[in-house]
Amino acid sequence: MTTPQGHVSVTCPVNQAIERMKRVLFQPFDLGKWITIGFCAWLAQLGEGGSGGHFNLPSHHHENVQSLRRAIEQALEYVMQNLYWIVPLVVALFLAGLVLWVLFLWLSSRGRFMFLHCVAFDRAEVAVPWHKYAREAGSLFWFRLVIGLAGMFITMPALVVAAVAGWRMVECGEPNVGGICVLAGMVLLMVLLGIVFWIVNGLTAGFVVPIMFRRGGGCLAAWGVLLRLLGGNLEHFVLYFLFQIVLGLATGAIVITVVLVTCCILCCALAIPFVGTVLLLPILVFRRAYSLYYLAQYGEEYDAFRAGPVTAP
């Protein structure tokens, strides 16, 4: 389905989402409702968090390079001498982390439908959406698992190549053009991969989940519906993602301002996982409602606020 260009806006859903947020959380204010919806929102974000890294090339001062080289050599020597317990420990930690990641991924897939249910229908419910959307959440989980593993297997070789290039420069005692080019290439590759996965995750959370919520069915089928929609409205979705950056900066500025006004007391509260989600619930409800209202502009069959799934044409 394609939509006439004049019928789609990235700004109109802002007011609609604000009104939905006020209706869900403040009309009237109910602490129990806040906590229940906050739990669903917390579950939806489980396992997510900012992560990143940066590369620091060795200093140009010879003595610093030598110190870094000696430190790395001592660390490697220690590891080689204690492989008998380091290897099992690393494997155990890796497997434990992998199990936790899969568990969080499964729970957050259930939570995304639960939170969407609460926002779309203005209901503070846990058990109903947990059972009602179990099949759709399972399909979403498997899709996210495959995407996550693919990202891991693509990124790890790039990290290894970057590490080897960095170590060779340390061994040489100074940076060289070849090593810097390899490092720059790997960083660029990981940045591009990060953008791709950001777009995939954004489309999945913003539109694929609501399509599954509205129509039922599996994740791949919902992706097929979305891709057909993208094919006729690509410029609108590009604008949507650009506007998401603006919204992110705006909401981030609001949070930072409130943190500064409260003398950073709020910052400590936000660091507590569940408490932080409850405090940020107005922003989370607004962001969830915004994408729903945006998607609803493409037709009644995409409107998640209408009760009951529709049959795909």
Image (cartoon, grey):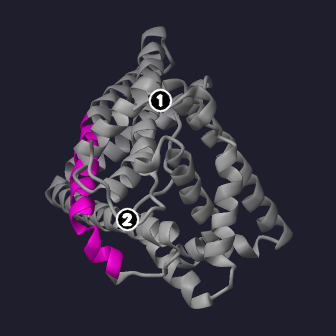
Question: For this rendering, which residue is in front, 179 or 117?
Answer: 117
Horizontal side of 211 relative to 280 (left or right) equals left
Quarter of the figure with residue 110: bottom left
User: Which quarter of the rendered picture does the C terminus lie within?
Assistant: top left
Residue 161 among magenta residues: no
Question: For this rendering, which residue is in front, 197 or 54?
Answer: 197
Q: On the image, numbered disc 1 is attached to which residue?
A: 191
Q: Which residues are magenta?
A: 128-153
**Label 2 packing within 10 angstroms: few (<14), some (14-19), many (20+):** many
Ranked by sequence position, the earlier of labels 1 and 2 is 2
Q: Amino acid at mark 1?
A: Val
In the image, is residue 125 above or below residue 12?
below
| For the residues bearing labels 1 and 2, Cβ distance under 8 angstroms | no
Query: What residue is drawn where x is 42% and y is 81%?
Result: 125
* Chief secondary structure of the magenta portion: helix
Horizontal side of 49 relative to 163 (left or right) equals right
Horizontal side of 152 relative to 83 (left or right) equals right
Q: Amino acid at mark 2?
A: Phe
In the image, is residue 302 above or below residue 72?
below
Quarter of the figure with residue 167: top left
Q: On the image, numbered disc 2 is attached to which residue?
A: 113
Res 208 visible:
yes
Position in image of residue 219 (x %, y %): 26, 48
Query: What residue is drawn where x is 48% and y is 9%?
Result: 177
Front: mark 1 or 2? 2
Position in image of residue 213 (x %, y %): 35, 59
SS at badge 2: helix
